[in-house]
């Protein structure tokens, strides 16, 4: 039957109340997308991740494939997998709060706030303030019979009195309107000028002085999260920040899955539309909140992994996942933002930071720029934990890098109650000596899930309290808490004043009663259900995911260190980046064996360096030059073809590691299980 | 009454048979334009030039304003001025052959043919062959796991192996398709690369080798005539040439009138459409004749007066005619030809040569480039006689220039039987000692009018034969021809073998019988009416126009020479350019006092140097650099505000001049009248 002649049904999604009409037979997951509801879906709709659970409240007819991913209880409660269910009648569906990623619900990125000044610091230290796009007020003496320089050249002369612009260029539409505008403005205009390599383009000319209104958006294109900062280009200040989920997420939680989906469904345009819409939503949100006219946003700048940048620009991403594992373009010239569908000034420019390779994107170049490791005499290590875990090692003379497919566990994906660092996320957690659990949530609200820093804490705390063993497995016998033996590793905890609503959520339990057998194996209760919040658990599968993630990162670090004969004591600094949460306890990253065992004062959590680097470049041409130099000079190690990587990975799949001698400080504080 | 509700009538134009439907009340001139028939109209439809005469063959109703420009005979024969006549019923109109400039009748430009190799000569001597737009065949090693350079950068590396391109740029659409194209072509592609200032743009990428198909069109944008040459960029050969009338012509025969018309009627778009259509018609004609795919024409390059270039690009031309007499842009960046509506490859580039001032356009820069006067130690003079007469004086150290509003007399406009150098134009004329007139027409066909070189001959011959006096007036008493006294000035005439159909058209007459009193004053019969051709006359008004034209040119030359203290004997060479016809007798230009009296061997007719210069630039980046240097370095003299110009002009309004001592050679060969 043709699409157009098929009977249509209405699906209503609760609690948002969003409705959509779809032809009979439409997959429910697809119907949800059409309604603008983004259900979590790791497998991209293949039916084996079990993430897209929804509840059917009302439906005359239900056709859903049997799946082992639903418990008997869930089946009784009319839970189905949206990707395995067809719409054959009008339906009312409830989307469980935990699984839904509604675009309407744009979360405030407190992490983004915290690190919003990092770009400014770096800039002040290293690069001259010289934004890629500037507005300058230009006053010219009007032409006379004795001064017959043409308008176009007159403008160039006047611009060159203010800025260094040996090579200039003007778009045809600007050229066409230029003369009339100069005349009507009495030769007093605002010129918006943008740098395109060595060329300075006159992007726009307006009558009068509008120099005070010049904004930019810096965007971090993450696989899971898209973050945007609104920057006032006249004073380099970050005006506001915002973040949203990447709405490609229901085509797969990692970008390899999304590339496969796009290839199999010829959905490259759709992929582009999704990410472009996400960026546009962020821009519009920021602009309307700060009462900034979109026409006054003259620049967009993006950093992100190579796949995301390819999706954004609709460049062919297919060989990122397939031999020879290359990008279509690493160095992308500035383009008109409108050409990619980005809604800023219609002649505004879109810059993409350069990338190194298919698996080391411009976000990593931004990180190297931000942490300045490329300027230092001593060796530093940079690790960015997102959906992938990229690591860079080096100094001012050399830089090596690699990417481990860590998986998105530390971004909260692939973890039962994992979530991104948004409101309600447990970002800090400690098991106290008395066995109670103290925790802090972002926004100090009731807990709704656990974000990266909380997960790291959880993994470390379970380990050092002996609840899981070195292989990451829950200890078969419940262990009663014993006081005293963990004191030294707890020294870093903040005072209780900083913690929110912890104690009453975590009354005194023995491990035994917290550790239960769930549908997915053993699970540990971090927060019992309350009146206004659900139970929060960590499962054996979650722990396995987290251990694999940290193992991937550590193995990558080991390969780079071994290859360059760098010893832990050679490391002058370790920079850990990622959207973990606000108060990452970097020591825990050593405890679980994600980072090499160096003195804790050498480790610094630097937050989202992707956006910080993008902002640095935005504010200085020299920083763009530096980013290009970094991208060109970095040596990429392909871990998949590296003979030692799998060994290192296997050895790292222990807590903290198979070879305990690599972690002397952890050894000193934990009992050997 | 609204336009849409007005009754419509059909007007049929003979002999073309073209028909048009227009609302009742439409001016007939406008109806003709709509039908695609371009009637000559100097005044732009104001009713005082009398050029747009047509014959009403059939019409129920005729409403035409009385005019002194029609003779009683013409009124009897139903001749009307199209600009003064309204369409109030269906009509059949005959357009006299002489006045119609049908776009369908594109004349072969033999002049263009003759000088088509000039560009090649200049190039060979001065500039390296390095076309602005090239196609290069690029073969790359496909990427491997060990060579993971991205496709975009891989292409750049391969291009840079072949050409010098430190700064490169790729349009977004090309970038988007690049990867898939490289893969499907096995990394063997043709890259079309264009120079935009210091930047090399990858304009197009195609699978396989297409380097053998790369063409360009060079265009001379004249006020009266538009000439185009099709150039094969792979071997610098001119493949074909074509010319057409500028179809803006019915808005005024000089560009000042057209600017006024455009301002008063908000017809800037219309002006652009006209000239763009003319250029497109030429391109399509050339391409179809030579079976060249428009997609293989990658470059268009234009030279022309400043106003024409402004019309072509729809830049504001209004201050060209009004204080402070400036251009909107003198140096126009390369643009996508499609942006201006030029129909070549849709990503092909349009270059405009740089201009000096509002009245010294890029055609003059092209002339200086072609004649190489900017490279010479000794002083040269360059004069380009078109609708205006621009002159340049200088050498490798300095260049001065000026423009006289000569009027289009030597292009055949403002002259009763004047016409451009096309088929049937009398391009050569001599009054023999026996009183008979010998003439040659372009294409050796029956004479239909007189072009520039024929008019120069006519003026000179009438003068040296004493038929007109030194003021240009017909001598009141007919003078019988006397043999002997003109021998020396006739030495330069070609042998009779080169002449066409002359003698039988000009039987022996005394001046008395040829010199008659016409409606417009005295007139002299050059060719009597025959079976298949009309009578061709030169009138007192024609002669006055021609004398004013030559006086304007000479006065401009005098101002430049006086200002730079250059004496005639300092002149090493005089280059005379313009669309005069094939065989301009340069000596006659001295005889009438248009050029300074220098030995005839120092004077060279160089034809259309505007297009020659455009072609030179097309074929070499260095030539474009030279053109820009020329345009920047030339000092412009504004004659209108120059204190000596009007005096010089008045003094030059004699044949050859008021001051006969300036023309010793003419003195030696003519009797002092």
Image: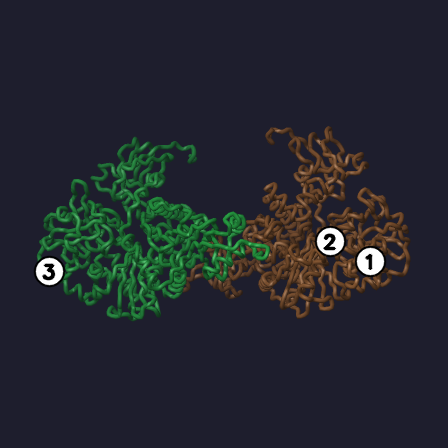
Chain colours: A green, B brown
Between disc 2 and disc 1, whose residue precedes? 1
Residue B356, by quadrant, is bottom right
Q: Position of residue B648 (x, y in %)?
A: 72, 58
As measured in the structure, the alpha-carbon distance from the residue carrying label 3 to the one carrying label 1 is: 118 Å
Q: Position of residue B196 (x, y in %)?
A: 53, 58
Say few, some or many: other residues with alpha carbon within 10 Å of mark 1 (under 14 / 14 to 19 / 20 or more).
few
> Who's the residue at 82% across and 62% down the image?
B667
Residue A145, by quadrant, is bottom right
B60 relative position to A132: left or right: right
Q: Chain of mark 3?
A: A
B452 relative position to A550: left or right: right
**Front-most of B79 and B512?**
B512
Q: Which residue is mark 3?
A: A485
Q: Compared to A619, does B398 lie above or below?
A: below
Q: Compared to A95, does A42 lie above or below?
A: below
Q: Position of residue B461 (x, y in %)?
A: 83, 56
Say few, some or many: other residues with alpha carbon within 10 Å of mark 2 (under 14 / 14 to 19 / 20 or more).
many
Q: Chain of mark 2?
A: B
Residue B113, by quadrant, is bottom right
> Who's the residue at 76% across and 53% down the image?
B547
Q: Which residue is mark 2?
A: B549
> Which is more foreground, mark 2 or mark 3?
2
Q: Which residue is mark 1?
A: B498
The answer to whether residue A42 shows anywhere in this view is yes
Label 3: which secondary element: loop
> Which is more foreground, mark 2 or mark 1?
2
């Amino acid at each position: 039957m043709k699409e157009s002649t098929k009977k249509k049904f209405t699906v209503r999604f609760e609690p948002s109340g969003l409705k959509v009409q779809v032809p009979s037979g439409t997959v429910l997951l697809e119907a949800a997308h059409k309604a603008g509801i983004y259900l979590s879906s790791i497998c991209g709709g293949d039916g084996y991740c079990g993430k897209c659970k929804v509840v059917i409240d009302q439906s005359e007819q239900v056709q859903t494939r049997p799946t082992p991913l639903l418990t008997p209880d869930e089946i009784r409660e009319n839970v189905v997998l949206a990707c395995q269910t067809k719409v054959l009648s009008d339906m009312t569906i409830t989307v469980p709060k935990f699984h839904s990623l509604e675009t309407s619900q744009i979360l405030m990125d407190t992490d983004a706030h915290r690190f919003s000044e990092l770009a400014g610091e770096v800039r002040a230290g290293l690069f001259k303030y010289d934004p890629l796009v500037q507005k300058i007020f230009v006053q010219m003496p009007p032409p006379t019979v004795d001064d017959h320089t043409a308008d176009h050249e007159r403008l160039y002369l006047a611009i060159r009195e203010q800025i260094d612009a040996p090579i200039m260029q003007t778009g045809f539409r600007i050229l066409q309107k230029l003369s009339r505008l100069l005349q009507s403005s009495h030769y007093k205009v605002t010129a918006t000028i943008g740098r395109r390599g060595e060329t300075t383009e006159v992007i726009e000319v307006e009558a009068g002085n509008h120099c005070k209104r010049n904004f930019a958006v810096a965007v971090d294109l993450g696989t899971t999260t898209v973050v945007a900062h609104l920057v006032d280009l006249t004073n380099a200040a970050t005006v506001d920040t915002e973040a949203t989920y990447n709405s490609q997420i229901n085509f797969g939680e990692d970008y390899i899955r999304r590339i496969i989906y796009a290839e199999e469904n010829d959905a490259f345009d759709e992929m582009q539309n999704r990410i472009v819409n996400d960026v546009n939503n962020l821009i519009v949100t920021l602009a309307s909140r700060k009462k900034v006219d979109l026409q006054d946003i003259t620049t967009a700048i993006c950093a992100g992994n190579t796949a995301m940048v390819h999706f954004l620009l609709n460049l062919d991403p297919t060989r990122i996942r397939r031999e020879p594992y290359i990008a279509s373009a690493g160095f992308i010239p500035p383009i008109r933002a409108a050409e990619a569908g980005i809604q800023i000034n219609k002649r505004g420019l879109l810059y993409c930071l350069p990338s190194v390779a298919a698996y080391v994107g411009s976000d990593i170049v931004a990180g190297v720029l931000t942490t300045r490791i490329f300027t230092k005499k001593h060796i530093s290590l940079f690790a960015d934990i997102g959906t992938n875990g990229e690591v860079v090692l080096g100094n001012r003379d050399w830089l090596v890098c690699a990417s481990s497919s860590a998986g998105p566990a530390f971004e909260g994906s692939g973890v039962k109650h994992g979530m991104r660092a948004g409101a309600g996320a447990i970002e800090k957690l400690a098991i106290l000596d008395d066995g109670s659990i103290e925790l802090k949530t972002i926004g100090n609200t009731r807990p709704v899930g656990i974000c990266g820093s909380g997960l790291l804490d959880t993994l470390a705390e379970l380990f050092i309290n002996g609840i899981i063993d070195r292989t990451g497995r829950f200890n078969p016998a419940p262990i009663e808490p014993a006081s005293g033996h963990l004191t030294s590793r707890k020294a870093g905890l903040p005072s209780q004043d900083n913690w929110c609503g912890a104690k009453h959520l975590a009354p005194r339990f023995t491990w035994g009663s917290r550790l239960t057998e769930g549908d997915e194996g053993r699970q540990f209760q971090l927060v019992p259900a309350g009146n206004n919040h659900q139970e929060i658990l960590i499962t054996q599968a979650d722990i396995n995911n987290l251990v694999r993630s940290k193992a991937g990162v550590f193995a990558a670090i080991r390969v780079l260190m071994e290859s360059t004969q760098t010893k832990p004591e050679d490391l002058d600094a370790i920079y850990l980046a990622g959207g973990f949460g606000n108060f990452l306890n970097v020591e825990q990253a050593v405890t679980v064996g994600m980072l090499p065992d160096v003195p804790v004062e050498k480790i610094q959590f630097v937050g989202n360096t992707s956006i910080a680097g993008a902002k640095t470049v935005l504010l200085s041409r020299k920083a763009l030059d530096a980013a290009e130099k970094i991208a060109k000079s970095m040596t990429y190690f392909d871990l998949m073809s590296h003979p030692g990587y799998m060994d290192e990975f296997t050895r790292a799949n222990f807590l903290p590691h198979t070879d305990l001698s690599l972690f002397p400080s952890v050894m000193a504080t934990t009992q050997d299980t």
